[in-house]
Image (cartoon, rainbow, N blue to C red):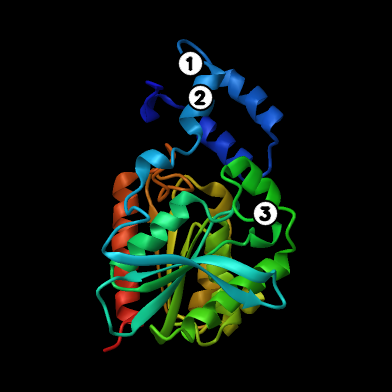
Amino acid sequence: MSQIKKEDIKQEVFDLYDDYAHNRLNRRAFVEKLSLYAVGGLTVPALMSFLMPNYQANVQVKADDPRLKSEYINYSSPKGGGTIKALLSKPADTKAKLGGIIVVHENRGLNPYIEDVARTAALAGFITLAPDALTPLGGYPGNDDEGRTMQSKRDKGEMEQDFIDAFHYLKNHKDCNGKVGVVGFCYGGGIANMMAVRIPELAAAVPFYGSQPAIADVPQIKAPLLLHYAALDTRINEGWPPYEAALKANGKKYQAYIYENANHGFHNNTTPRYDKAAAELAWKRTIDFFSEYLKNA
């Protein structure tokens, strides 16, 4: 077990991991650059092990939690990937129709962290749907490296359609009250912004450190937005000032928070970029926001 502590790691190491996780560095280049920080008692294998996600040790809501009814379903996306697999979750003891939440994964498919987020959101009193955009290629392969490679091979527009069709599937589900929002992380944050642009009836959107839509598309947004950014995430944050200016200029309803000393991916509790205080506060704000806009009065 690695004894490396987060506070012992230079910010440049987290930035390198961000480049690697977003396909700007291949594995060989990542390892080579990481070796510059393997000093003292640190080794490259130890740093690699420290940075990679540990899914099994960080599950918050288990797949068989008796408080939930959680199952894999398939829905149709004719102009997307065809038939898409997704995790559908809702409270086990609720008969009433519920507000719906689409949970959008990062750039690596429906991994255990995103499934856990979907179950956690369902426990808060919603029906959630977490699609796997890797379904046409066989589904999430069990590790993030392969997942990233697979997702990069999919057509961008078809993947976007997968999530738009997920919205319509959930909106029309017998257990949904017809009010559907979206929360997405990283790539999924960008998808949440895209859905706000392209789905007029979207009830709420919560992008976590997501790429912004084209400024010319901002007038199309109808849904209220709750936007979470990490102060150390300079790559994504570059797009925020013009996006905010456009939201203001067009009279859009939004709330935005920038979490100090937090890295891109701060909500993901399976990697050392996780910031417990920021993640818990952002999640509380998210559930409160969805409760306001998705639950029946």
Image coordinates of residue 108 in percent, x first then y, are 60, 51
Image coordinates of residue 107 in percent, x first then y, are 60, 53
The mark found on residue 42 in the picture is 1
Gap between marks 3 and 2 measured at Cα: 25 Å
The mark found on residue 55 in the picture is none
In the foreground, 289 or 104: 104
State left or right for residue 246 relative to residue 114. right
Q: Is residue 234 above or below residue 90?
A: above
Q: Which residue is mark 3?
A: 151
Camera-near label (3 vs 1) is 3
In the foreground, 226 or 128: 128
| Helix, strand or loop under label 2 | helix
Residue 251 appears in the rendering: no
First in sequence: mark 3 vs mark 1 = 1
Image coordinates of residue 149 in percent, x first then y, are 69, 46
State left or right for residue 231 relative to residue 85. left
As shown in the figure, which amino acid type bears the numbered disc 1?
Leu
Q: Which residue is mark 2?
A: 47
Say few, some or many: other residues with alpha carbon within 10 Å of mark 1 (under 14 / 14 to 19 / 20 or more). Answer: some
Residue 80 appears in the rendering: yes
Camera-near label (3 vs 2) is 3
Gap between marks 3 and 1 measured at Cα: 32 Å
Query: Are the residues flagged by discs 2 and 1 in contact, CB closer than 8 Å?
Result: yes
As shown in the figure, which amino acid type bears the numbered disc 3?
Gln
As shown in the figure, which amino acid type bears the numbered disc 2?
Leu
Q: Residue at x 33, y 50 (%)?
A: 278
Q: Residue at x 69, y 62 (%)?
A: 136
First in sequence: mark 2 vs mark 1 = 1
